[in-house]
Amino acid sequence: MKAWLVEKNGDPQDVLEWKDTPDLQTRPGLVKVKVLAAALNFPDILLCQGKYQQTPTLPFTPGVEICGEIVEVGEDVTRWKVGDRVCGGPFSDAGAGGGYAEYALMKADGIFAVPAGMPAEEAAGYVVTYQTSWASLHIRGNIKAGEVVLVHAGAGGVGSSAIQIAKAAGATVIATAGGPEKKRILTELGADIAVDYLTEDFVQIVKDATDGRGADIIYDPVGGDIYDKSTKCIAFEGRILIIGFTSGRFAQAATNHVLIKNYSVVGVHWGYYRQMRPEAIGQADAALTQLYADGKIKPYVSKVYKMSQVIEALIDLGGRKTTGKVVVIPD
């Protein structure tokens, strides 16, 4: 089989090579899949550079999200069968990734059935983004119909999923993104009010839209200055959901302000639910599958590249030239 290999750390364009690799051997607890699509993520770039929080053993294959068709099952696997279409994270002995390849291994107890009718390119980047947003809004945010939700980076992967899930829950959604093209995408995704944060003040827009009350929930995958400004438009008993820190700066919560305005700053780490509350993962999967069947969510894939274009795709992703999810499919 062939796969993109990293044999030394560096920028993707300098270290990724498409090479022949040994065929993967299915083992107990694992399934082998033919990769139908792989989603790109910023951690893939950091993994190549050796700058991610986990350092895989060299050589390794990046790609942390895939959709695949099962071609072999481990001897103890009973839930899945050959021919099933599944999505989730690949398993690699190197310690990370494995999706940028013709075939991949996946843990049988950590993958999900692709919702009926969902194309492979949508399914590849579906699990992490949509389960993160569902857990954020429903479990940590306790969203209610009629509330106002402010979604930052709404044209991105998790942000676009948050807009759709919040709308499906009956909320009014205000979403931010940078530039007129991304602002247009926010509207297409269902946002009631779209804001170009490069030229517009989202704090004032939120206050005007809520008669000064502020947003009940603020979904923040950006952090830094965006978090700081968000505290100026959070409602009484509101919830600021901390999803990530793409700005590169960890904001500092002013606890006196939290007390005075009586709001919550809530951390969201979807990955920990697997070990701390695994039933929540199943609950999210069931709810999202139904939402997709009802036509209330649809993964936003902005561009599909060929597997041979992985380097080009990662350069575009790293240069913030993309929106939503970016996916590669076999040539």
Image (cartoon, rainbow, N blue to C red):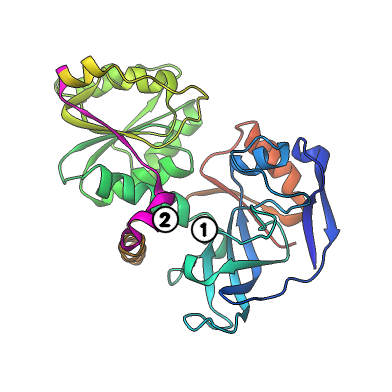
Residue 283: percent from left, percent from top? 30, 63
Q: Are marks 2 and 1 in contact (CB under 8 Å)?
A: yes
Amino acid type shown at disc 1: Glu
Q: Is residue 88 left or right of residue 329?
A: left
First in sequence: mark 2 vs mark 1: 1
Residue 100 part of the magenta-drawn span: no
Residue 1: percent from left, percent from top? 80, 68
CA gap between label 2 and label 1 equals 8 Å
Query: Toward the viewer: 155 or 132?
Result: 132
> Is 166 above or below relative to 51?
below
> Is residue 113 at least partly visible in the picture?
no
> Is 130 above or below relative to 90?
above
User: Residue 197: which disc?
Assistant: none
Residue 276 part of the magenta-drawn span: yes
Residue in the image at 73% along x and 71% along y: 24
What residue sits right under mark 1 in the picture? 122
Magenta span covers which residues? 260-280
What residue sits right under mark 2 in the picture? 298
Residue in the image at 54% along x and 73% along y: 85
> Is residue 275 at least partly visible in the picture?
yes
Residue in the image at 35% along x and 18% along y: 228
Amino acid type shown at disc 2: Lys
